[in-house]
Image (tube, coloured by chain):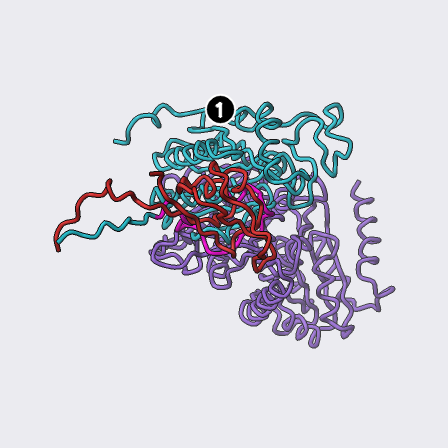
Chain colours: A purple, B cyan, C red
């Protein structure tokens, strides 16, 4: 199939359909609504389930129900909606059923705004729901990569009976970009053996996250941790740009990583030996790779559209081998390539850090930038 | 040769096939057990067991799944109708029912039940109304009677401060998406028989695709009402029925016709 | 002659709630105060002749603990065919 000009959210929805999604349950919220609108049209055409739920709470529990039947199912929402879904997400994780959840992240906290942000990093990557569980989190940076990640998300969800979050932002959701959609997958003929489908000719199946005896719950927790270690071993994904000979590394994911790639190319033209490392799987995080990078570059610049949440994951991996610096925009602001280029230039001067606290130094710089911009 | 005139023995009553052998965790005299058994009997008699998926709630009946010999899932508190929706929409040929208490259905799950009914989800809801939160130890429920003492209305439910009991069946019957909404009681044999008939009608509603069906069952909670099991049944008849009248609130006329 | 019936109460399920005792139209069920079930309840049992197998006790029983039997009167039986 040839590349065509596709609109983010709609392409993502079509990708989900082609991956075999048989049930979509959602609630309108900007900037993810086109996803739901597209599903409202396409799913009934294919004889598949679409429900506009009364709330995100209901939507995620519909996903939970459908997931228990072994059918591929998903929802798409945006930050405040994802907060409401956290109850169901925890239950889905505890029940060990597969589900895909797309979060088109917007500025926050609270009602915030509808502009692109990465402020949900902690909520997504660290779990967000109650209890001991590990979600898989994929953070693509283009329409094509998101299409691919959504297909992958369904495969990983099934393989590990896990929650898979695909996090994007309004930039990607609204973007028109040439991309290629995969062919339509055939739907499976038989449900998985654990699914509830009616106990015909077999013992009844029961799916729940309740383990009233703490000893049983612990056995479940052990299973979840071991599964997660398996995921950490097999499912790390990332993208590198001009990292082979890099003396300086920029690390950024999603839109921030994408903007940084322009800045890195511009810096290369100025002769700065800088490369970009862009994690695609935020969970599992490419820990080994970041460790390796910190052994061969002189300095690392982390770029995000939040207050340095991934930074907090990177600093311990670097173990003080090289200085780690940070640049971020927040509240729905997207950094310009020039801003990041300035940061790359500054980092490449390789001056001693002022006090070694990347966040404190950044917030002082950012305050000035915001002040000057007024 | 003629058989000897030995009387034949007939089993008049035994545990339904859709019931597992487990002893329930319910307190002695709690009518949850009666409701469970009626559902199991109806599912057996209608031959639905092998295609039924039950949705258990949070509350005393959180372990309902253990007692039914059929596929089951366990929903978050109040979300059973949403989960049932998710299941039914991808498996429309299966029979899907939820079993919910008054806290689950009429308080935390109010939005989910109302909208499942409004959408006309082709599912069956069994609503156990015992006017109290049993599992957490006897707190005031949305269906607690005015003046009734609970651990969170220790001086009796003061309607000035805490409002009035909610009549779910009456409210749900106003929804066009519903096919069958009735209230029955489990306080004596006559009413239990009527309740069973209603459950049959509710599942029939689903089998015929006539929309959302619900049977509200007035049920006892001897432990948290702090009265013995027999007196608890009297409490239902004397105190609950006047507030929650036993009636048919919505019956799709198709149901009274013979199946084609 | 009245119909003869009897009940069997499953010790595993009976919780001694006594709803069958008060519901029995023949007044022939009581809790057995001389026995405890494995779960520590005094189980229901028949105390007298007169059970008709009407199943009222089983219908009110919240624990499906009661199996009800009834003798089918001989006169109502069709003559069995010869073997």
Q: Is residue A137 or residue B95 the one in the foreground? A: B95
Quadrant position of residue B254: top left
Quadrant of the drawing holding the C terminus of chain B: top left
**Position of residue B103 in the picture relative to residue A185 (left or right):** right
Magenta span: predominant SS is: loop
Write down the residue under mark 1: B247
Q: Is residue B172 above or below residue A298?
A: above
Can residue A10 be spotted in the picture?
no
Q: Is residue A159 above or below residue B81?
A: below
Residue B168 spot, x, y in % from top left: 56, 29
Quadrant position of residue B234: top right
Residue at figure coordinates x 78%, y 73% from the top left:
A320
Residue at figure coordinates x 66%, y 57% from the top left:
A131
Range of the magenta residues?
B11-35
Q: Is residue B238 or residue B208 the one in the foreground? A: B238
Q: Secondary structure at mark 1?
A: loop
């Amino acid at each position: 199939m040839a590349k065509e000009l596709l609109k983010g959210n709609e392409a993502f929805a079509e990708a989900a359909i082609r991956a075999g999604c048989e049930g979509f349950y959602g609630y309108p919220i900007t900037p993810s609504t086109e996803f739901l609108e597209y599903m409202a049209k396409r799913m009934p055409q294919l004889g598949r389930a679409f429900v506009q739920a009364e709330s995100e709470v209901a939507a995620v529990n519909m996903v939970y129900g459908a997931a228990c039947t072994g059918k591929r199912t998903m929802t798409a929402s945006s930050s405040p909606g994802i907060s409401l879904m956290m109850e169901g997400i925890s239950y889905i994780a505890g029940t060990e059923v597969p589900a895909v959840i797309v979060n088109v992240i917007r500025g926050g906290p609270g009602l915030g705004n509808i502009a692109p942000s990465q402020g949900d990093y902690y909520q997504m990557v660290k779990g967000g729901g109650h209890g001991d569980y590990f979600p898989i989190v994929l953070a693509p940076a283009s329409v094509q990569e998101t299409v691919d990640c959504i297909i992958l998300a369904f495969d990983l969800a099934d393989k590990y009976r896990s929650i898979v979050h695909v996090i994007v932002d309004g930039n990607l959701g609204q973007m028109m970009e040439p991309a290629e959609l995969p062919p339509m997958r055939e739907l499976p003929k038989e449900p998985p053996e654990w699914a509830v489908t009616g106990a015909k000719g077999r013992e009844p199946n029961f799916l729940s996250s309740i383990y009233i005896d703490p000893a049983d719950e612990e056995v479940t927790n052990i299973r979840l941790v071991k599964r997660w270690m398996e995921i950490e071993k097999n499912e790390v994904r990332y993208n590198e740009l001009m990292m082979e000979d890099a003396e300086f590394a920029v690390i950024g994911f999603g839109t921030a990583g994408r903007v940084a790639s322009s800045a890195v190319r511009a810096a290369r033209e100025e002769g700065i030996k800088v490369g970009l490392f862009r994690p695609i799987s935020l969970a599992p995080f490419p820990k080994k790779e970041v460790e390796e990078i910190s052994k061969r570059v002189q300095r690392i610049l982390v770029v995000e559209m939040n207050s340095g949440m991934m930074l907090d994951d990177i600093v311990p991996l670097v173990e003080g081998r090289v200085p780690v610096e940070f640049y971020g925009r927040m509240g729905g602001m997207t950094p310009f390539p020039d801003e990041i280029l300035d940061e790359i230039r500054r980092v490449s001067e390789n001056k001693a850090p002022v006090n070694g606290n990347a966040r404190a130094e950044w917030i002082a710089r950012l305050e000035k930038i915001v002040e000057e911009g007024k | 040769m003629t058989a000897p005139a030995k009387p034949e023995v007939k089993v008049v009553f035994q545990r339904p096939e859709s019931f597992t052998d487990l002893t329930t965790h319910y307190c002695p005299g709690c009518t949850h057990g009666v409701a469970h058994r009626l559902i199991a009997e109806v599912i057996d008699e209608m031959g639905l067991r092998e295609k039924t998926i039950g949705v258990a709630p949070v509350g005393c009946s959180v372990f309902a799944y253990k007692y039914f010999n059929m596929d089951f899932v366990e929903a978050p508190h109040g979300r059973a109708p949403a989960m049932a929706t998710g299941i039914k929409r991808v498996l429309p040929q299966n029979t899907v029912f939820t079993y919910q208490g008054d806290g689950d259905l009429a308080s935390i799950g109010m939005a989910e039940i109302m909208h499942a009914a409004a959408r006309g989800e082709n599912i069956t809801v069994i609503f156990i109304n015992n006017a109290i939160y049993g599992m957490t130890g006897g707190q005031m429920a949305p269906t607690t009677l005015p003046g009734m003492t609970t651990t969170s209305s220790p001086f009796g439910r003061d309607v000035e401060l805490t409002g009035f009991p909610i009549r779910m069946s009456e409210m749900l019957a106003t929804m066009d998406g519903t096919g069958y909404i009735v209230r029955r009681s489990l306080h004596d044999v006559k009413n239990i028989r009527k309740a069973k008939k209603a459950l049959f009608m509710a599942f029939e509603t689903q089998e015929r695709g006539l929309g959302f069906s619900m049977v509200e069952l007035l049920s006892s909670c001897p432990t948290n009402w702090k009265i013995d099991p027999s007196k608890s049944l009297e409490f239902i008849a004397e105190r609950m029925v006047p507030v929650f009248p036993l009636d048919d609130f919505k019956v799709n006329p198709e149901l009274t016709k013979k199946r084609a | 002659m009245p119909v003869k019936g009897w009940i069997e109460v499953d010790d595993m399920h009976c919780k001694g709630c006594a709803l069958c005792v008060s519901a029995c139209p023949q007044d022939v069920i009581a809790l057995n105060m001389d026995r405890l079930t494995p779960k520590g309840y005094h189980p229901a049992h028949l105390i007298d002749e007169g059970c008709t197998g009407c199943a009222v006790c089983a219908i009110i029983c919240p624990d499906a603990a009661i199996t009800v039997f009834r003798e089918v009167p001989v006169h109502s039986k069709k003559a069995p065919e010869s073997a």
